[in-house]
Image (cartoon, rainbow, N blue to C red):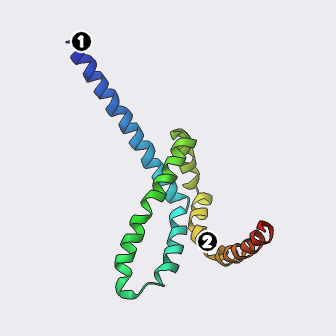
């Protein structure tokens, strides 16, 4: 009987830990959305999809979204490894403030505004690397 009770307690505690982990991961997913990370990806998607013929765009977008799953999983894992659940909740509270919402709302616009500068910098960086790599 004691073994049965011990097994029951173990299973119950495992389920509670799993539920806590799920809540933490769900909060991290919410935070990633709130930070504007997804809107930055949407800017990139918008640029890339224009290069795909119209009749293939639907299938491309499906594959594009699927290809992002490992990226978001890596981001989630980073938050989980570097922040406590309480810290994530506090960051979410910030992003729920007017200033936090403004940051999120402007994330895509910031990406679009800086895209050309980043591309120009990348080209100059390649030249700089070539200069010093020889």
| Residue 50 located left or right of residue 94 | left
Up/down of 80 relative to 117, above or below: above
Q: As rendered, which of 75 and 113 lies closer to the eye?
A: 75
Identify residue for label 1.
2
Name the residue: 60% across, 64% down. Answer: 102
Name the residue: 59% across, 51% down. Answer: 94
| Residue 31 located left or right of residue 4 | right
Which image quarter holds the C terminus?
bottom right
Mark 2 packing: few (<14 Cα in 10 Å), some, or many (20+)? some
Identify residue for label 2.
111
Up/down of 93 relative to 48, above or below: above
x and y percentages locating residue 46 in the rendered image: 49, 78
Name the residue: 50% across, 64% down. Answer: 38
x and y percentages locating residue 112 in the rendered image: 61, 76
As helix, strand or loop, the secondary structure at mark 2 comes to helix
Which image quarter holds the N terminus?
top left
Q: Quadrant of residue 37?
A: bottom right
x and y percentages locating residue 11 in the rendered image: 28, 28
């Amino acid at each position: 009987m004691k073994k049965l009770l011990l097994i029951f307690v173990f299973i119950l505690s495992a389920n509670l830990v799993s539920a806590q982990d799920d809540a933490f991961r769900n909060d991290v997913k919410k935070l990633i959305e709130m930070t504007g990370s997804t809107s930055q990806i949407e800017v990139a998607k918008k640029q890339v999809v224009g290069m795909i013929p119209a009749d293939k765009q639907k299938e491309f977008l499906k594959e594009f979204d699927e290809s992002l799953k490992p990226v978001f999983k890596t981001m989630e894992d980073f938050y989980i490894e570097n922040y406590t659940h309480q810290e994530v909740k506090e960051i979410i509270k910030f992003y729920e403030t007017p200033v936090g919402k403004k940051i999120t709302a402007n994330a895509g616009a910031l990406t679009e505004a800086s895209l050309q500068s980043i591309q120009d910098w990348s080209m100059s960086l390649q030249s700089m690397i070539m200069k010093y790599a020889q």
